[in-house]
Image (cartoon, rainbow, N blue to C red):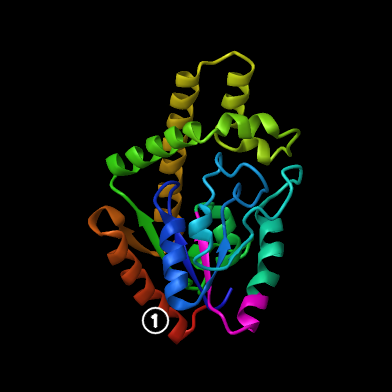
């Protein structure tokens, strides 16, 4: 996919906040590449950006489909490409933002292409934190979820598709609702599962992409926005495959 810039990385790294500020700075629009934020509902469980963040720039494919619909990387590609074309037809730049590796690959190289053998060189940044800092952010996010009534959010949702069923924490909160787990046990389990997921994401983006790494633990938010904006401007000016 031509002329898009990617901001990828593990959960709780701060991608959404960074991307919204970069998009605002560049007049760009954001395509969500998170396999669970694409579903309607589950705002808390999936860590969707807050309203103030969403207001900074147009966002696409967040809360776009029913939780009863099956999703995969192929369906995501088919949904995303027309949106990208429509944005670019209006003369706007596209930022693809997310942590779902296969969804990102579906846009950068297609589903059947081996990125290592491909001449395609998509431009983007792989953001992360030092491990202890990332784990602190993950634990804090889960704590906020419970303070903000994630249990009630799950209680209100009925049947979901097999892919939506894989959301981290859904099964555990249902066990909590069934009286099979305490709140503290549920929270700790979700924190642990999310930390493990972040490790898998880090491994994927380090080995499956050539995006430039950026350790956010070494920068302020403003410095990171400035750095990424400069890289994106250069990429858009040069054009990229």
| Residue 28, horizontal then vertical, whole percent | 51, 75
Measured along the vertical axis of the image, is residue 179 above or below residue 127? above
Left or right: 236 as drawn, with respect to 73: left
Which residue: 49% across, 36% down? 145
Q: Which quadrant holds residue 160?
A: top right
Which residue: 56% across, 33% down? 150
Residue furthest toward the left? 218
- Let me know if residue 95 is in the magenta part: yes
Would residue 80 be visible to someone looking at this image?
A: yes
| Residue 130, horizontal then vertical, whole percent | 28, 47
Numbered range of the magenta stretch: 85-98
- Let me know if residue 31 is in the magenta part: no
Residue beneath disc 1: 234
Measured along the vertical axis of the image, is residue 154 above or below residue 67? above
| Residue 11, horizontal then vertical, whole percent | 45, 46
| Residue 209, horizontal then vertical, whole percent | 45, 61
Measured along the vertical axis of the image, is residue 180 above or below residue 222? above
**SS at badge 1:** helix
Measured along the vertical axis of the image, is residue 233 above or below residue 17? below
Left or right: 141 as drawn, with respect to 169: left
Quarter of the image with the N terminus is bottom right
Left or right: 218 as drawn, with respect to 135: left
As rendered, which of 125 and 227 lies closer to the eye? 227
Which residue: 30% across, 65% down? 222
């Amino acid at each position: 996919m031509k002329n898009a810039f990617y901001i990828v990385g593990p959960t709780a790294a701060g991608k959404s906040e960074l991307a919204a500020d970069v998009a605002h700075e560049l007049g760009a629009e954001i395509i969500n590449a998170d396999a669970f934020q694409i579903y309607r509902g589950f705002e808390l469980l999936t860590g969707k950006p807050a309203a103030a963040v969403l207001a900074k720039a147009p966002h696409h494919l967040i809360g776009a489909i029913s939780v009863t619909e099956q999703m995969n990387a192929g369906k995501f590609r088919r949904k995303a490409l027309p949106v990208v074309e429509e944005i670019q037809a209006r003369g706007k730049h596209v930022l693809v933002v997310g942590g779902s590796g296969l969804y990102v690959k579906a846009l950068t190289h297609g589903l059947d292409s081996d990125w290592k053998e491909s001449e395609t060189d998509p431009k983007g940044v792989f953001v992360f934190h030092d491990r202890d800092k990332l784990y602190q952010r993950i634990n804090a996010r889960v704590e906020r979820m419970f303070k903000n009534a994630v249990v009630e959010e799950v209680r209100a949702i009925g049947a979901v598709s097999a892919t939506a069923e894989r959301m981290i924490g859904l099964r555990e909160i249902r066990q909590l609702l069934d009286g099979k787990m305490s709140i503290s046990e549920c929270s700790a389990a979700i924190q642990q599962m999310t930390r493990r997921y972040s490790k898998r994401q880090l491994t994927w983006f380090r080995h499956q992409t050539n995006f430039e790494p950026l350790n956010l633990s070494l920068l302020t938010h403003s410095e990171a926005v400035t750095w990424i904006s400069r890289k994106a401007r250069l990429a858009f000016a040069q054009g990229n495959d």
